[in-house]
Image: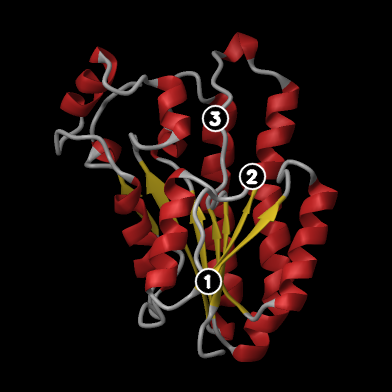
Amino acid sequence: MSERPVAIVTGGSAGIGATICRQMIDAGYEAVSVARRKPEWSHPALHAVEVDLTDAKATEHVAADLARRFPIAAVVHNAGIIRPNLLPDVRQEDLSDLTQLHLGAAILFVQAALPGMRERHYGRIVLISSRAALGLPTRTVYSATKAGMIGMARTWALELAPDGITVNVVAPGPIEDTEMFGQVVPAGSERAAALAKAIPVRRLGRSNDVARAVLFFADPASSFITGQVLYVCGGASVASFSL
């Protein structure tokens, strides 16, 4: 493995993804943000690629190009969208887009990075799922695809363990400093306050909370941990609450 390993972070331009990039860089990585827009910050160890990850062909091209350019040590698939709807209003277009974004893009980036990881007998794959994988009203497509990430990660963990590659999942609960959360629950609203009160630890999550979990799984010392799901949710995964 190179002296400064490289981490691919999808959705790395803002919110949780940007925080993951910053923490990966602080931990000694070079970070490559792959998102629809460039990050609003810069660092000598930060690279950025713009692509629509719901476009399978464009994503495949970017993944192959990055695998040629960088010795990829970690893939963190963080990019996501919600598209909330009650069951009667769920659209097939949403199912197609979220399946490609949450599952298809992860497959393409890991497939591209896999030959190099196997050659170096080292790799860290972290998929960002959601507490919503356990079920949540209006989340038919989001919950289904985020739950699919968990099954996919557990399968990869079994397949890739002999190659020194670990595969784990971080499943966040409500993270208040993200665009995605703000689109559903306005910041500073009574609804946000009520939601925080309903969470066992009595607060909403922050991007730093999620990034720390990612760094734990990405650490070279975490080689005996694979196929696991870590809910970063303030206890919401063991309590009843609704957005």
- Residue drawn at point x = 34 percent, y = 38 percent: 175
Q: Quadrant of the C terminus?
A: top left
Side (left or right) of 201 relative to 177: left
In the rendered image, the residue lying farthest to the top is: 88
Three-letter amino acid code of the residue under disc 2: Arg
Q: Is 47 rendered above or below residue 104?
A: below
Mark positioned earlier in the residue sequence (3 or 2): 2
Q: Regarding mark 2 in the picture, which secondary structure is present there?
A: loop
Instruction: State the mark number for residue 37.
Output: 2
Side (left or right) of 137 relative to 120: left
Q: CA distance from mark 3 to mark 2?
A: 18 Å
Three-letter amino acid code of the residue under disc 3: Ile
Q: Is 220 rendered above or below residue 57?
A: below
Of circles 3 and 1, the one toward us is: 1
Instruction: State the mark number for residue 98.
Output: none
- Residue drawn at point x = 65 percent, y = 84 percent: 118
Q: Regarding mark 1 in the picture, which secondary structure is present there?
A: loop
Q: CA distance from mark 3 to mark 1?
A: 32 Å
Instruction: State the mark number for residue 82.
Output: 3
Of circles 3 and 2, the one toward us is: 2
Instruction: State the mark number for residue 44.
Output: 1
